[in-house]
Image (spheres, rainbow, N blue to C red):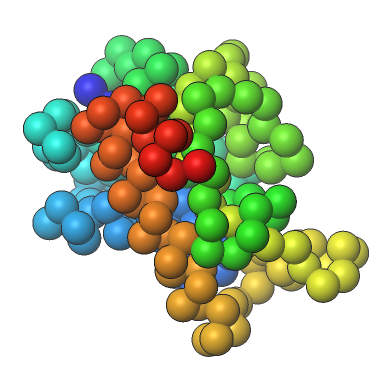
Amino acid sequence: MYLIVGLGNPEEEYANTRHNMGFDTINEIAKRNNITITKSKFKGLYETAIIQGKKVILLKPQTYMNLSGESIKEICEFYNIEPKDIIVIYDDIDIEKGKIKLRKKGGPGSHNGMKSVVQELGTTEFPRVRVGIGQPEFKNDMINYVIGKVPEEEQKILAEGVKKASEAVEEIIKNGIDIAMNKFN
């Protein structure tokens, strides 16, 4: 069983922000696979389903970004999910808008949501899909950049990244992280 987690902030308030690329990717995966996310537990919204012939859980933590790891830890303990079977999807300012990068493992960098995930899981040994949002024009405007509304002309570029990320997740499920990295990196 795979746990596919998109990092973000509660959607009513934070929809269409750069920091919600993880949620947007989960929504895209759900749409592509005709899945409706209806369950609320483990400090998140989730649904179990079959994708590429394998059982998966789609999860959107509702703890706000900086505590995302709490939701992931709870669901992993309940379903006895190993870190190697977790795929975390999140926004990355160091990747160009509309691009993605897959990694088998690694540190959290400067991403607070990933810091929480690594802290709660006690490991960096899990695959991740990073969705590029690019850099803000001014470094001191980082908070407004990641949680502010995205201009309409930029939404299409970010949507391309979300589409690629959802395809990459399906490839990981179908053929494993190594093949997916060769195909998408």
Q: Residue at x 65, y 53 (%)?
A: 95
Q: Residue at x 65, y 73 (%)?
A: 148
Q: Viewer-proximal residue, 54 or 81?
A: 54
Q: Vertical placement of 69 versus 65: above or below?
A: above
Residue 172, image x, y percentages: 32, 33
Residue 119, image x, y percentages: 63, 22
Image position of 87 (left or right of 132): left
Q: Quadrant of residue 80?
A: top left
Whether residue 122 can be seen here: yes
Whether residue 77 can be seen here: no
Name of the residue lying farthest toward the front: 182
Q: Quadrant of residue 143?
A: bottom right
Quadrant including the N terminus: top left
Image position of 176 (left or right of 178): left
Q: Residue at x 83, y 68 (%)?
A: 141
Residue 159, image x, y percentages: 43, 69
